[in-house]
Amino acid sequence: MVAEAPLYLDACATTPLAQVAHEAMEAARQLAWANPSSLHGFGLSAAESLERSRHSLASSLGTGAEAIRFCSGATESVHLALLGAAATLPVGRLLISAVEHPAVNAAAAQLQRQGWQVEPIPVGPTGLLDLGVLESLLHPPTRLVSVIAAQSEVGSIQPLTTIAQLCRQAGVLLHTDAVQLAPHRPIAMDELGLDLVSLSAHKLGGPRGVGALLVRPGLRLEPLLGGGGQERGQRAGTEPVVLAAGFAAALAAARRHQLDGTSQRLEASRDHLLHDLLALPGVRLSGPDPTRQPRLPHHISLLLSDGQGRPLDGRKLVRALWNEGVAVSSGSACSGGSGRAEPSPVLLAMGWDRSQAASGLRLSLGSWLEASQLERVPLALERAMASCGAAAP
Amino acid sequence: MLAYLDHHATTPCDPAVVAAMAPWWGEQFANPASRLYRPALEAAAAIEAAAAELHQGLAAPSGAQVVFTSGATEANNLALKGLAEAALSSGNPRRRLVSVVSEHHAVLDVLRYLERHGFALTLLPIDAQGLLNPADLQAALDPGAGGPVLAVSVMAANNEIGTIAPLAQLAPLVHAAGALLHVDGAQAVGHIPLAMEAWGIDLLSLSGHKLYGPKGIGALLVAPGVQVAPQLQGGGQQGGLRPGTLPVPLIVGLAAALKQALADREGRALRLAALRDQLWTGLQALGGLTLNGPPPGPQRLPHNLSVTAGGVDGTRLHQLLRRQIAVSSGSACSQGSASHVLAALGRTRAEAAATVRFGLGRSTTAQQVEQALRAMADALDQASNRSAASRPER
């Protein structure tokens, strides 16, 4: 048994609710509990709180309040973005990166069933999009592009400015899944000229059950949900006012952390931990080398092998590390469930072979951690690897 | 203090529900999909317990699936689009949908969407009390009326005029025609008795914030064997039927709210029906008010009352009322357009605007009812044409 409290190093799966978000939700629960569509005083208080959250989010994201559509989370947001935009366009071609979240792949597959051509843009060994291929396909029938701004499994940050510029020049709509990027980097939606941006609150210290789609003003979208006409007719359903308050407070705090040194301290902790982990035998980095390429500042992804260089089973390592008191992930939490080691589609797309692509481990840090808490992680990993290596068939 | 009498629009989240959610907003935050370590498994267990609570509380048939959604709007969309899509892809030839003119927009909008995509839609009329005639349903279910019916959607209780549908009588007709019954239970669950299996409900939608739970959560219950195509896809959560990271605190809150609402339902219904009757008696004494929907009694939600002040300027009436009580003219979701429910009862636009819907709730007191009666007397006095001429503005 582990004496110390378990260490939570899985921020990319979900984050604990930030204290400021908790407080904002408590305040909203007291004063803004009513239905924001109601016309009486209780309803007006709820509407005022909702609009304040909307303005706060918009200013954190470099756009206007009219761009924000609250929804239940990123899964819904990416569906609304891709299916909603495609429904207003003639059937054509959708370009997506080869390393998208399963929700984007699923929405793309749905468009494919509707007659759309879906073309994955290959990525290089660090998970970065091949811009040459992208550019070569930015002509009719391409009408829509979806790119994950920062990759959840391997931490690569795409050159969004360039991608947005290419899409704009070609007159093609761009959606970006910014779920993992938004907690760590500013997203200047208007300045970059992004058309559609998906966000989730619970990946940035906000509550689960709420997210947003940012929609460039004037862009038409077919709603996914019919109903009461909320959110400019693009997303029906009573808005979750309390959740929206937590979302806005959490994003504002994340922005402050980028300015007050918190993010830099987190990145330094990550660099230190990464350095120590890479010194262990059988451990190598996947995704970009943060000293040379843009990478999420809290993110470590590794490929692990035993003494003979044989890839270990990432899922077994996650269990073994939990027994050492450290919570990590073998990849995207959402692709789990089968219980067996499946190669990660993201790692396969980056050129790793099947057994290597099943040997991945992700450690993602958060501002709730003290640097000193991370000191025991290398030893824990070493012990976990030893136990998995011994048990390998 | 303004009395809140608009519990059909939303209910405040009960302190006990807030308390039940608290640990899940705090230290127990793990993602239940990260199945490889213990906190995530605990979260997954909490979701299973919540699903069991809903299953039991709504007397669902064994093997029914509980699908958590962002609310009743999403549940209604998932139920109807999901049924239609599953029928299309499985070769099921049924292409007709039947519902009622007085359904919520979250049902009507979806049905109209499906109508644009190849389904034939029959909307049944309602009588003066908001009830649909079973003979009309029977006729609409006849394949001779345009082909076999895939599904019938009927709300358990109307959000504006409180009419309770005789679901247990309707279900046999629906099933005899080989169709499925979807029920929007947003206004009924936790307020009136509802038994999914015994009443023959195949799909049941509900919302957390209408039963003293949190906003942002609801559920669709699906009877075993009913094929529903997912409307969102991705991480494979909830058997692939509704992916997305599960909002554990909200799910725990929904289950706690349902449990509490079912526990105090009978007593609350009796108490609120008495208060509502007190309100109606007092309003009748004011004169000039017409009741919308069934008379207070078994066919009406115990906490609902809807009255129209004929010949009164509705805008003025509601402006005056707003200073003293929180009520509405109809659905909060109607975005200012005239109520289609009142129109179906034969009310004009002006009458619909001069309609006051009362929704009593757990916190409603006899004093608040008195307050509402005084507010109504005052507002009617000032807003009605005869007094407007003779009385100076206050």
Image (cartoon, rainbow, N blue to C red):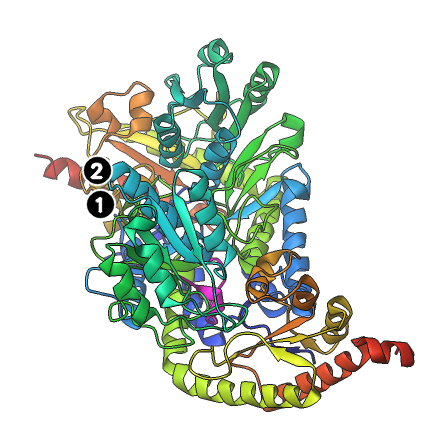
Label 2 SS: helix
Q: Is residue B261 visible?
A: yes
Q: Is residue B196 above or below residue B73?
A: below
Q: Is residue B5 left or right of residue B77?
A: right
Based on the displayed image, in which of its 4 quarters is residue A92 positioned? top left
* Residue numbers of the magenta segment: B205-216
Label 1 SS: helix
> Disc 2 residue type?
Met
Which disc is residue A385 wearing? 2
Identify the residue at horizontal 35%, vertical 65% (top origin): B135
Q: Chain of mark 1?
A: A
- Residue B225 percent coordinates (x, y): 20, 53
- Residue A140 percent coordinates (x, y): 50, 13
Query: Label 2: how many residues lie within 10 Å, few (<14), some (14-19) or many (20+)?
Result: many
- Which residue is more in the foreground, A234 or A360? A234
Identify the residue at horizontal 77%, vertical 74% (top origin): B320
- Which residue is more in the foreground, B244 or A80? A80
Q: Please, which residue is most extreme toward the left here?
A: A393
Asked if labels 1 and 2 touch by Cβ distance under 8 angstroms, the answer is yes
Q: Is residue B264 left or right of residue A175?
A: left
Q: Is residue B51 above or below residue A199?
A: below
